[in-house]
Image (cartoon, helix red, strand yellow):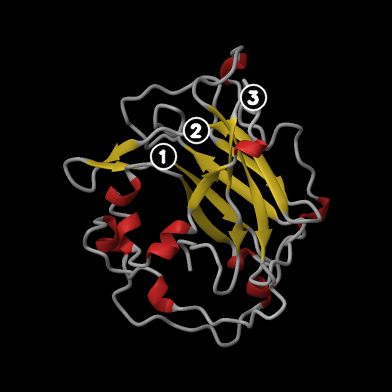
Amino acid sequence: MSYQNKRFVERDRNWHPPGYAPGYKTSIARSPQQALMSMQKPTVSELSGPDFRKLRMGPHDNDLLLNFRQDQSPGLPVGERIVMFGRVVDQFGKPVPHTLVEMWQANAGGRYRHKNDNYLAPLDPNFGGVGRCLTDEHGWYRFRTIKPGPYPWPNDPNSWRPSHIHVSVMGPSISTRLITQMYFEGDPLIPLCPIVNTLKDAEAVETMIGRLDMAHSKPMDCLAYRFDLVVRGELQTYFENQ
């Protein structure tokens, strides 16, 4: 696709879910009750931010199979091994180089390593569930991890979250951090999820689905899922904090 003739497209607010979505019950208490305020004169803290070009990464920061060991436990995490990769680009297809991409997820049983997660699935002593990397000069990022499992949550008597990975992309300042979720192609729980269903535009949902990429899968090792992140314009990925 040629991006040379693509014009700048103003954000369509109707593409995003409402702040108050009764079907997504936790949005009721946290949705804005008053009119939003616009910051006409942002301060330096909103306009400036960290420069990640000199950020030193650990050797396994983007490899969740190797970056966590509880009590020096030997072995590898349990679950389906996958590679998650893609490009961070703008609306014209121009790569966003040297930006920080972070991700976090549940383990193969659907449990997060977090003190508030009391789901009955066991923790994996060899899996922490967090990773980070910098995009290269062409905007590419890559993680090796375990496919997360679905899990129940108390939205209603039998609500389940589809398997998903949370993804954060840093912009030129802390205030321009964008957060989204990657779901997995073909997951039957996606259309049943109350959070997904706050999006009324099917195209917005499609931007959050990672696609199976057999060309980048490793035989006898792991499948690969491609998840490109478009940070602005008519082709942008849906970000939950916009």
Q: Residue tagged by mark 3?
A: 219
- Quarter placement of the N terminus: bottom right
Residue 184 vertical position relative to residue 69 in the rendered view, above or below: below
Callout 2 touching callout 3 (CB < 8 Å):
no
Q: Quadrant of residue 17?
A: bottom left
Secondary structure beneath disc 2?
loop
Task: Assess disc 1: are there few (<14), some (14-19) or many (≥20) residues with their C-alpha within 10 Å of its C-alpha.
Answer: many
Between circles 2 and 3, the one closer to the viewer is 3
Name the amino acid, label 2: Lys
Give left or right: position of 211 versus 54: left
Q: Could you tell which of marks 1 and 2 lies nearer the N-terminus? A: 2
Q: Could you tell which of marks 3 and 1 lies nearer the N-terminus? A: 1
Q: Which mark is residue 147?
A: 2
Secondary structure beneath disc 1?
loop
What is the CA distance from the residue labelled 2 to the residue labelled 3?
A: 17 Å
Residue 217 picture location, percent across and down: 63, 33
Give left or right: position of 135 versus 15: right
Task: Assess disc 3: are there few (<14), some (14-19) or many (≥20) residues with their C-alpha within 10 Å of its C-alpha.
Answer: few
Callout 1 touching callout 2 (CB < 8 Å):
yes
